[in-house]
Amino acid sequence: MNAEVRAIKTPAEQALNAAYTAARAKLPGKGAIADLREAAFQRFDAAGLPHRRIEEWKYTDLRALMREAKPLAEPAKAKGKVPALPGLTAGRIAIVNGRYEQAWSDLKPVAGVELSDVFAFAADQKNYRLGAVPGHDDIAVSLNTAFMTGGVALRVAKGVNVEKPIEIAHVFADRAAAAMYPRSVVIVAPGARVTFIESFNGPAGVDYQVNSTLELLVGEGARVDHVTIGSDGDKALRISSVGVKVGAKAIYNSFTYTAGGAVVRNQIFARFDGEGTQASIGGATLLKGRQHVDNTLVINHAAGGCTSRERFRTVLDGESHGIFQGKIVVEPHAQKTDAKMATHALLLSDEAEADNKPELEIFADDVQCGHGATAGALDGALKFYLMSRGIPENEAEALLIQAFIGEAIEEIAHEGIREALLNAAAKWLQAREQ
Amino acid sequence: MAFLEVKNLHVEIEGKKILNGLTLSVEKGQVAAIMGPNGSGKSTLAYVLAGKSEYNVTEGDVLLNGESILQMAPDERAAKGVFLAFQYPVEVPGVATMTFLRTALNAQRKTRSENELSTPEFMKLVRDTAGHLGISQEMLRRAVNVGFSGGEKKRNEILQMAVLQPKLAVLDETDSGLDIDALKIVAEGVNRLRSPDRSMVVITHYQRLLNYIVPDVVHVLAKGRVVKSGGKELALELEAKGYAQFQGEAA
């Protein structure tokens, strides 16, 4: 609990308070949903924007980084196109300015896959109770719950193998800055398999704000490959939270690629509820200029015999700031847990800063858990080796950076997504060299 | 004029003087062995020729084909034909051996204003050479030296040398850490590359390597300078008598 008495609210907090009061009656969902919003807003209002004295937000002081709260985004006025990562083929579901826009989407009907607006699906909380995933009480998630304007509910039926990736494409499509609060739900029934992407895009030069939350249920024996691609505009502030519950003997692979945005926080709250789950939670982050990107994980081994691998790599140029916070919790009965976390930062400039905060909270006694973290510059011996073979310095550096980040991206199982991201990373490097 | 001329070379690293007026000439097509005790400056000479930046040349010059190379970056020297086979080849995670070879060869050719090799030409060149050295396709697909044994790393150095076709090959203790079978494979690889157009500097502590790579001349290094030069029989003499006879001389 935050015992501090805070009489004075920041302008951003005041604006959020006013925005909620004004919008409350018009936001979608009645009854249980409205109650959920109200409770979430009260949580947020009591705590305020998280700041550096809140341990989980130590390195991403939102009170300082979010000086103003932008007005709630209006629905897109005209139909537009979803920006796609070159080379990436997927059926797209467009979430524009925080609302599901069927007209922008190109996902063709897939057997065994159901899609609807999130509030149409969860309005009366009978089909699904929103907020039933880990991370629900997090302050950023609470803010999303208070303001959530739309999104989708995507369901994959029992035993269905979805061949082609499905992309939930979040787009901010205005020229004037505003804030969007998309909320989506993905439910993968037992034994089903799906690869889905969450992407985030918006215009350069606009300081729009995104606070997204995804609720993901991975059924028993299911396999979910979940890739997040952050390609926001250079002035954007985005907080994306994923709350995921994983059933027994499931495979959950998550990968978060971030190259865009001014301030980005990716949060994953995962809980393994059944035995024998295998999870791989990875990420690659490419930073330059004054970008600030924070990857924060809370991984809860709530059942025994689960394996998790957390592997994140970050390249930092300019005066950028990269943060990794990874907490692994092993509950008392979660014996035979096997969890290993590794995080590596490659610093290309003296002004860049990388912070690594691994945390292990182990309450079971028969487990294998470990973590490792490195942060350093390019290895001079490697560079000399490459140059001694005739490779010019800038090319040698590019090859080594590409190799560093490529080793992370190689974790992605889906070849098309892997290749698209390897190409995106190569382009980022080419732009750096010029 | 010799192809490689090292003139009165003085070199320091972190304020410590390693080379003390080293003078050495290697003719075009000549294989010169450099022998000497530990700490005599053999590896320093190899690194200075390749252009490692930590070494500070305080006096003297190194001429390649009459041109000073001391102001050149390592990649420029490589394009001029300098190749160093490392004593301890480094592992390059995430860079496939094939990609590495092709990037290096094309970079050199580009610097020399030559056309890039076509993919089939390149593949044939690598496959033929790799076959001789017992390097499998699987190894070529793997990241450079990652998970390679000591012998595999040394063979990979010779493969790189064969693909890059240098004019001056410097082999730094290529025999270290090799068993006799691996040594033979590596030496055969080197001997196949002997050519009237290629000079070699073979650095070794032991005479053993020189049974397989027979040098034209042998230079003995002690305390950072050449203290004796002779034919290949000098290596045998050193094997019999040891380096003690030279340890005092250069002081």
Image (cartoon, rainbow, N blue to C red):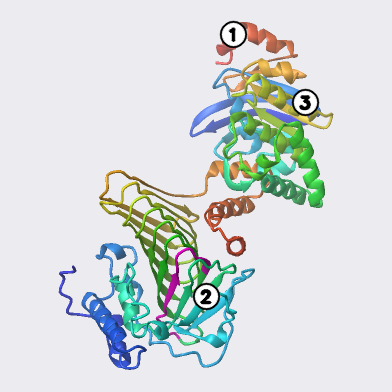
User: Which range is magenta?
Assistant: A177-196
Residue B245 is marked as: 1
Q: Residues within 10 Å of mark 2 (few under 14, many from 20)?
A: some
Q: Is residue A404 left or right of residue A73?
A: right
**Residue B244 is at least partly visible in this image:** yes
Chain letter for the residue marked with disc 2 in the picture? A
> Which of the two residues, A271 or B149, is positioned nearer the viewer here?
A271
Above or below, B83 against A379 in this view is above
In front of the other: label 1 or label 3? 3
Q: Is residue B155 left or right of residue A208?
A: right
Above or below, A404 against A40 in this view is above
In front of the other: label 1 or label 2? 2
**Residue ID for mark 2:** A113
Above or below, B44 against A110 in this view is above
Residue B191 is marked as: 3
Badge 2 amino acid: Val
Chain letter for the residue marked with disc 3 in the picture? B
Badge 3 amino acid: Asn
Question: Residue at left 69%, top 29%?
Answer: B6
User: How many angstroms separate mark 2 from mark 3 (CA)?
Assistant: 65 Å
User: How many angstroms separate mark 1 from mark 3 (CA)?
Assistant: 31 Å
Task: Please check the rendered image and state whether residue B38 is part of the magenta-colored stretch, yes or no.
Answer: no
Q: Residues within 10 Å of mark 3 (few under 14, many from 20)?
A: few
Badge 1 amino acid: Gln
Q: Secondary structure at mark 2?
A: strand
